[in-house]
Each structure stands twice: as structure tokens, then as C-alpha cells.
Amino acid sequence: MGWELRRTLAPLGEVIAPGRRELDLGDPDSVRSAVRQARPGLIVNAAAYTAVDRAESDPALAMAVNGTAPGILAEEAGRLDASLVHYSTDYVFDGTKPAAYSEEDAPNPLSVYGASKLAGEKAVQAAGISHLIFRTSWVYGGRGRNFLLTILRLAQERSELNIVDDQIGAPTWSRMIAEATAQILAQSARRVGERSGHLEQAGLFHLTAGGQTSWYGFTRAILDQVFPGTGPASASREPPRLNPIPAAMYPAAAARPKNSVLSNARLLAEFGIGLPHWSDCLKMCLSDMEQQ
Ligand SMILES: NC(=O)c1ccc[n+]([C@@H]2O[C@H](COP(=O)([O-])OP(=O)(O)OC[C@H]3O[C@@H](n4cnc5c(N)ncnc54)[C@H](OP(=O)(O)O)[C@@H]3O)[C@@H](O)[C@H]2O)c1
């Protein structure tokens, strides 16, 4: 998401994008000195400890990066009279609600990762600065490590894939999150009358693609795009056989919510922005990757 934001935010003002070496979120002094040196008008925090399973055995670092560092960023933003945009996750919920979660629903994370991200949300809110927190879900894209790239690799390596079919969410293309963020910031800047910087609104918003599916459904859609069947464009080899399995059959260190579909109604009402259906975004992403 950081890579997408760097490109998408560029028209709004100068973007400084420090990597881990210049700004280590696990080290409060590094966070403070990087912010004090750059003196930004707006901080967008796209970095996080995202290894959901590894976090179970590494809770101190997950909490430092996801729980404590966002509070330090917010504190430093406050010193500069700057604003903060921060991202959080659907995994703050326990997944027992039989419908889409709204921002008013009570979080109850099942994992260390979810708990650390919830702590980060609270730390940002407690700082009392102008901020936006976007909770998103099942993020994928053409770069980095993510579910889409893993499936594309496995589809070349294996003849059969077993994929969890009893966890429901909304796969969300990182580029859509970046573009929605840029549009919201541009709207806000127009209203406040600045090119970048101060946010008019503060608050928590769900920001995910439309629709919902399971990991199995997402995988089916990926394979249907990549192995379209007949015709000149069809792939040279057979697609792997795809088997739906329950999460109980896939041993993972961290528990994940059965339902983590988020309602985007607040985002639409406040900003007039709604991301397209996840399957349309997937097609756009794959076609973009093909052109690279
Ligand atoms: N991925 C998902 O499915 C998902 C779902 C819901 C919400 N989110 C949230 O969306 C946001 C963006 O996630 P993403 O998908 O872009 O994650 P990602 O691809 O895993 O990228 C995370 C980035 O954070 C950096 N990072 C990790 N630890 C750091 C540290 N100590 N100091 C500085 N940088 C550090 C990583 O740097 P290195 O490259 O050096 O490791 C990486 O560039 C995060 O807030 C995440 O919690 C993600």
C-alpha cells in the first residue's frame, strides 16, 4: 500500500517516503527524529507489522510497531500541528456478527495482530489531533507479499490447492485504497483551502472493496482470470484443482474472524466515495499486472 500511496499522493504535495532504515517503527527515537527532521504537514502511516501468524510468537514487536508507534506518530504530528492518516484492519473484530460490521460495532480481536492494531487505533484517537483511520481488509496488489501473488505462484507450482471457504471478507486492491485516500485528502484540502496538510474531518472509516467472498471464492476468481479456459488467450497449462476446506483443516498460529465484512456506508455518506466490487477490482489489478 505504501508503494501505491507514494505515487497516488504525489499530485497533492511533496511526498517523503522513509523506509525502515530511516524510520523504524519499532524504535520510538527513530520515529521521533525522522518526523522532526522531515517536518511534514501530513503523516500517512502505511507501515505495520502485518505477519498475522508470526505476531502470535512476537507480540512485543507487533505491539511496538502497530500499537505504540502510531501513538508516537500522532504525538509528533500534534507538535507540528500536522494531521495523521492511519490504516487499521478488519481483524479488530471477532467475526461473530452475522452481517457487515459498522464503525460503531465493538471490536474484539482474536489475534495478537488484531489486538495490536486496535491499540494503534486507540493511541491515535487519544492524541487529540486531526486524523483519519481507515480500516481495510484482505489487501492485495501487484507488489510485495500478499494472497494474490501467493496464489499466482502456487498455481504454477502445484496441481491441487486447498483453500479456506468458511472465512468471509472483502479482498481490497491496495491501489483502490490509495486512490480513495488521495481523493479524500484532496476533498479535505479544498474545503480547508490548503494544498495539503490539515484535515477537516477526524474519525474512523471502513474502506474496503464492495461485495464479499471467502478465500476460496477469491482464489476461484483469480484462477478463472488467469486460466480463462478456451480460446487463443488460454493458458498453456491446466489450472490446479481447487478444493474448499474449513479453516479448522488449515493449521494457523493466529485465529481469524469467520466474518470480517465491513460496511462502507459511513465513507459513502461522508465523502461520497465507495470502492468498486472486489471482483471488478481484481480484474483491473490483473490487467494492470499484465501490462507491467
Ligand atoms: N495486508 C493485509 O491484508 C491488510 C489487511 C487489513 C489491513 N491492513 C493494514 O493496511 C496497512 C498496509 O498494509 P500492507 O498490506 O501494505 O502491508 P505490507 O505489504 O506487509 O507492508 C508493510 C510495510 O511496513 C513496513 N514495516 C514493517 N515493520 C516496520 C518497521 N518496524 N519500521 C518501518 N517500516 C516497517 C514493511 O517494511 P519492509 O518491507 O522493510 O518489511 C512494509 O513496507 C497496514 O496498516 C496493515 O495493518 C493490511
Image: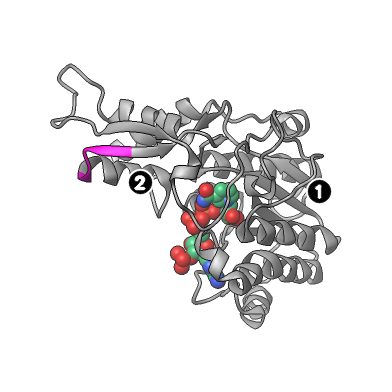
- Label 2 or label 1, whichever lies nearer to me, is 2
Q: Position of residue 219 (x, y in %)?
A: 39, 34
Q: Is residue 254 visible?
A: yes
Query: Which residue shows up at 39% across the image and 42% down it?
Result: 148
Q: In this picture, is 25 found above or below 253? A: below
- Assess disc 2: are there few (<14), some (14-19) or many (≥20) residues with their C-alpha within 10 Å of its C-alpha: some
Q: Judge from the rendering whether residue 117 lies leftward or rightward of residue 156; answer left or right.
A: right
The first of marks 2 and 1 along the sequence is 2
Whether ligand 1 has any atom under 8 Å from the Cβ at mark 2 is answered as no
Count every numbered label the image shows and give the total: 2
14 or 108, which lies in front? Answer: 108
Query: Which residue shows up at 69% across the image and 29% down it?
Result: 98
114 or 136, which lies in front? Answer: 114
- Assess disc 1: are there few (<14), some (14-19) or many (≥20) residues with their C-alpha within 10 Å of its C-alpha: some
For residue 149, the mark is 2
Q: Position of residue 30 (x, y in %)?
A: 61, 80
User: The magenta stretch spans which residues?
Assistant: 157-161
Quote the CA–CA distance across marks 2 and 1: 34 Å
Q: Amino acid at mark 1?
A: Ala
Q: Amino acid at mark 2?
A: Leu
Q: Position of residue 171 (x, y in %)?
A: 51, 37
On the image, numbered disc 1 is attached to which residue?
202
